[in-house]
Amino acid sequence: MQKKFKPGDKINVGVIGCGQIAQIMHLPYICENENFNLYSVCDLSRLVIDSVGELYHIPAGRRFTDMDAMLADEALDAVIICTKDHYEPGVKAAKAGKHMIIEKPLAYSLAQCDEIISLAKEKNLVLQVGYMKRYDPGFQYALEKIKTLKNVNLVRVHDYGGSFDFTTKIYDLYAGTDIPKEVIEAGNQATTAAKISEIGKEREAFLQSYDLICGLSSHDTILMRHAFGDPKVLFAHVSKPGFVTAVLEFENGVQCVFESGLVTSRRSWDESLWVYSDDCNMSVHFPWPYLKNAPTVVRINENEEGSMINYDKEVVSSFDESYRREWRHFYECITEGKTPFTCGEDARKDIKLASDIIKAVKL
Ligand SMILES: NC(=O)c1ccc[n+]([C@@H]2O[C@H](COP(=O)([O-])OP(=O)(O)OC[C@H]3O[C@@H](n4cnc5c(N)ncnc54)[C@H](O)[C@@H]3O)[C@@H](O)[C@H]2O)c1
């Protein structure tokens, strides 16, 4: 019988996968939220869970290298899954009846997404996917403005990520250097098999691009979909491994140019959502996902009301951190029965779109 929660109740949370994003963002934000109790941690690395366990005062008996043992504890109410591949932990956590935040992407094939979604539904669990930018106040400001636009001419999603090498220089992180190579290799093979099962063996050469859209650009495809609806793919091209350009079309005929790539030779982050309309041109510029409280900036070019006098405006609506807001939303979903903005069914659409884009690339 699924435990029922009400506002004010404390939720015991476990973290599965205590690597970079868990250490930088989730662990601190769980702890600062008075509605959650950081209850247990799990990682393949004993070194990592002991270091993180000491830092966050987690008793030795609640530090696990085996997720089955962690999930067997009935006092554990919810988990966040921050492993690289979320399929196995997602299935196991759902079977164990735990509410979940699953980091993005939900999974690497539609079949895997469906399995996690249906298990969570069966048990009436909250399944929220970790698209924190959906909770970003800058994006939420832009979304309200986008909804008022009458004649949209073009949408553009530009996502060129940069190097992440600075994370270990600005944060003190523990790395799982004690995990046997064979264990890591077996995990990588299972993940690759799931990706190939989705895009097809004949498209194996585009694996890196599929990975990039699922991993990095799914952040942008969900925001694009929430602003403009679900598109179909008109054209897609992979110019070199890891880079994709596509043309999408929404139901109302408006088109979107989608550009995705990763340039790790530079510490630059170039991720933005653009909308060109008769009313105004607008762009939303996202900061590096690892910089806490860095604001999302919205740029607007429009006329002064009722005139042809034109101006540019740059809006910073808040310095609140998206990850922090993501956890607050999760709590509301568990205790007030709300559906997450980034629920499993919705996150599945990003995997479908990534798959459709890759399948549209000419062989
Ligand atoms: N929302 C965002 O902007 C954002 C940013 C970074 C990463 N992520 C996502 O978070 C996830 C983790 O990324 P990361 O950069 O922290 O990776 P990471 O490699 O630093 O951490 C993953 C951790 O999971 C552990 N792990 C792997 N398999 C496990 C298993 N079966 N049981 C227990 N522990 C296991 C590893 O030992 C490792 O410590 C990825 O899915 C990534 O897409 C999201």
Image (cartoon, rainbow, N blue to C red):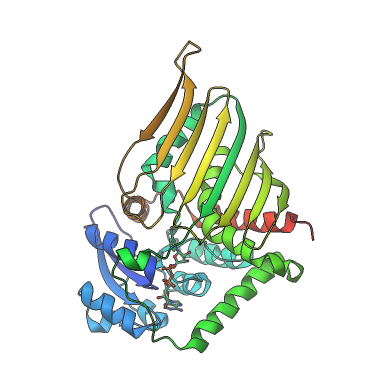
Instruction: Please tell me which residue is depicted at 53% across the width and 62% down the height of the picture.
Output: 117
Residue 22 figure quarter: bottom left
Front-most of residues 326 and 292 = 292
In the picture, measured across the screen, residue 177 lies left or right of residue 29, that is right
Residue 295 position (above or below residue 119): above
Instruction: Please tell me which residue is depicted at 38% across the width and 51% down the height of the picture.
Output: 337
Front-most of residues 315 and 71 = 315
Q: Is residue 206 visible?
A: yes
Residue 118 figure quarter: bottom right
Q: Is residue 79 visible?
A: no
Assign the N terminus to one quadrant of the image: bottom left
Residue 213 position (above or below residue 79): above
Q: Position of residue 72 (x, y in %)?
A: 37, 79
Q: Position of residue 264 (x, y in %)?
A: 51, 62
Instruction: Please tell me which residue is depicted at 65% across the width and 54% down the height of the picture.
Output: 244
Assign the C terminus to one quadrant of the image: bottom right
The residue at the far front in this view is 265
Q: How many marks?
A: 0
In the picture, measured across the screen, residue 177 lies left or right of residue 60, that is right
Q: Position of residue 268 (x, y in %)?
A: 45, 53
Residue 225 figure quarter: top right
In the picture, measured across the screen, residue 301 lies left or right of residue 357, that is left
The residue at the far right in this view is 363
The residue at the far top in this view is 306
Image-quarter location of ligand 1: bottom left
Q: Position of residue 241 (x, y in %)?
A: 65, 63
